[in-house]
Image (cartoon, grey):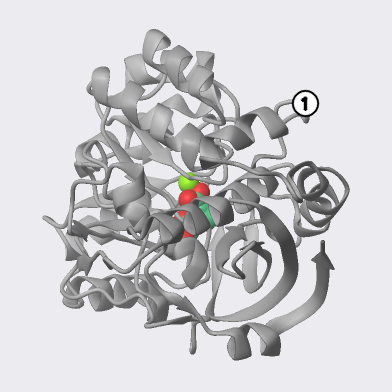
């Protein structure tokens, strides 16, 4: 396929509710969409899951716009490629910037699958036709509001509840949740809010029968997580510490974490995500697909990667309606009693609603 044109959209979407984690609150998502167009005029779509501020990772929307405009898009324009895996060679000279790389590579994967006449799930080697999904709930000032939020998602049948924790909003909150919901599959995401000095606080969470504690310590760390895992009964899940295949290899060797939250953007795209999946499968390390408050485009990519066999735990790919009054894809992502049916239409399996994208696009650039 020949990539004749690439469109870059900076999109602003207001979420239904603010989302608060240990590092901040987001109400408006400011992210990028990438559209690649081949010699037949067919389009593939990817999403750059950055935020306006670099609070979760070092990339942010403006930096990724520049990275795509100045380096990544020019490296791909008018190139003839057989398979999306070839993009690794084009991107290799440029360090990190994984969210930007993933957006462009994801668009090429979508286009590739459409040209093959298969779903992205099939193109990736997916083996499922439906997936169990969980939901991630932000920090609430008021415990009754959090308990009501949990009740709502339990009533909707989500297969796992993820709550955010931070120092001062952790042990007592989890205790109150367990008093109300003694048996629900429950996990906590700390987003690196703790250090090894908090080991007693983190050990105090062991009695709550959590499925996992996600990223308790610093982003990028593997050594201290390995020390902490020796102290905890609860499995540690790694998110911000895993940016590559090599990070996973070392985490397994060090026993830094026993579960991997795979985010396609964080690891630099679907080709790397597949390699990490295969490594975790060989090492019997369970995985699930994390979320970055995506629009339907990014959500569609998450669904496709979750169809691979070793994604054995419910992920964060909730329904479009969890975040958006109106999503930018048709049909929207829906979940029925915690089960999401994977579309079998070619590519990402959802149509991008160009009118809805246009309404929310605050900056656009066409590259030929
Ligand atoms: O998309 C979702 O619903 C998951 C949201 C979520 O938990 C996160 C999104 C982005 C960064 C973090 O705040 C957090 C995570 O660490 O998984
Ligand atoms: Mg996380």
Residue 193 drawn at (x, y percent)? 57, 40
Query: Which residue lies under the disc numbered 1?
Result: 93
Most extreme residue toward the top, as rendered? 253
- For the point 57% across and 56% down, the residue is 107
- For the point 35% across and 67% down, the residue is 318
Sort mark 1 into few (<14), some (14-19) or many (20+) by Cα contacts within 10 Å. Answer: few
Residue 155 drawn at (x, y percent)? 18, 77
Depth order, front residue of 75/338: 75
- For the point 44% across and 15% down, the residue is 249
Q: In this image, 54 relative to 303: left or right?
A: right
Most extreme residue toward the left, as rendered? 183
Q: In this image, 341 relative to 69: left or right?
A: left
The yes-or-no answer for disc 1 within 8 Å of ligand 1 is no
**Total number of numbered labels?**
1
Depth order, front residue of 80/228: 80
The quadrant of the image that shows the C terminus is: bottom right
Residue 247 drawn at (x, y percent)? 52, 20
Q: Is 30 rendered above or below residue 195?
A: below
User: Looking at the rendering, which quadrant does residue 365 occupy?
Assistant: bottom right
Q: Is residue 56 visible?
A: no
Most extreme residue toward the front, as rendered? 40
Depth order, front residue of 68/264: 68
- For the point 84% across and 54% down, the residue is 69
Q: Is residue 79 visible?
A: yes
Residue 127 drawn at (x, y percent)? 19, 46
Q: In this image, 189 relative to 18: left or right?
A: left
Q: Which element type, helix, strand or loop, lies under badge 1?
A: loop
User: Looking at the rendering, which quadrant does residue 131 occupy?
Assistant: bottom left
């Amino acid at each position: 396929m020949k990539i004749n044109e690439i469109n870059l959209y900076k999109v602003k979407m207001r979420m239904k509710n603010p989302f608060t984690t240990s590092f901040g609150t987001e109400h408006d998502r400011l992210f990028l969409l990438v559209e690649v167009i081949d010699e037949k005029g067919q389009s593939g779509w990817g999403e750059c899951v950055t935020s306006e501020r670099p609070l979760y990772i070092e990339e942010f929307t403006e930096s990724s716009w520049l990275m795509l405009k100045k380096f990544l898009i020019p490296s791909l324009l008018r190139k003839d490629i057989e398979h999306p895996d070839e993009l690794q060679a084009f991107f290799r000279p440029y360090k990190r910037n994984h969210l930007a790389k993933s957006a462009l590579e994801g668009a090429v994967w979508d286009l590739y699958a459409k040209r093959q006449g298969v779903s992205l799930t099939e193109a990736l080697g997916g083996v499922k036709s439906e997936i169990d999904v969980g939901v991630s709930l932000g920090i609430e000032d008021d415990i009754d509001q959090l308990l009501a939020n949990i009740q709502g998602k339990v009533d909707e049948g989500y297969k796992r509840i993820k709550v955010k924790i931070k120092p001062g909003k952790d042990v007592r909150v989890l205790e109150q949740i367990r008093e109300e919901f003694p048996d629900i599959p429950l996990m906590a995401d700390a987003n690196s809010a703790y250090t090894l000095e908090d080991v007693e606080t983190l050990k105090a969470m062991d009695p709550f029968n959590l499925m996992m504690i996600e990223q308790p310590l610093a982003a990028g760390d593997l050594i201290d997580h390995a020390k902490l895992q020796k102290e905890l009964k609860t499995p540690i899940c790694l998110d911000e510490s895993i940016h590559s295949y090599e990070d996973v290899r070392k985490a397994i060797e060090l026993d830094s974490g026993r579960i991997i939250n795979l985010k396609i953007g964080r690891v630099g795209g679907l080709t790397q995500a597949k390699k990490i999946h295969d490594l975790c499968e060989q090492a019997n390390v369970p995985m699930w697909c994390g979320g970055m408050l995506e629009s339907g485009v990014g959500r569609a990519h998450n669904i496709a990667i979750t169809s691979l066999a070793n994604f054995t735990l419910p992920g964060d790919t909730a329904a479009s309606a969890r975040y958006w009054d109106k999503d930018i894809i048709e049909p929207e992502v829906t979940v029925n009693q915690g089960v999401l049916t994977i579309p079998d239409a070619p590519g990402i399996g959802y149509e991008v609603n160009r009118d809805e994208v246009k309404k929310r696009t605050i900056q656009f650039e066409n590259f030929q």
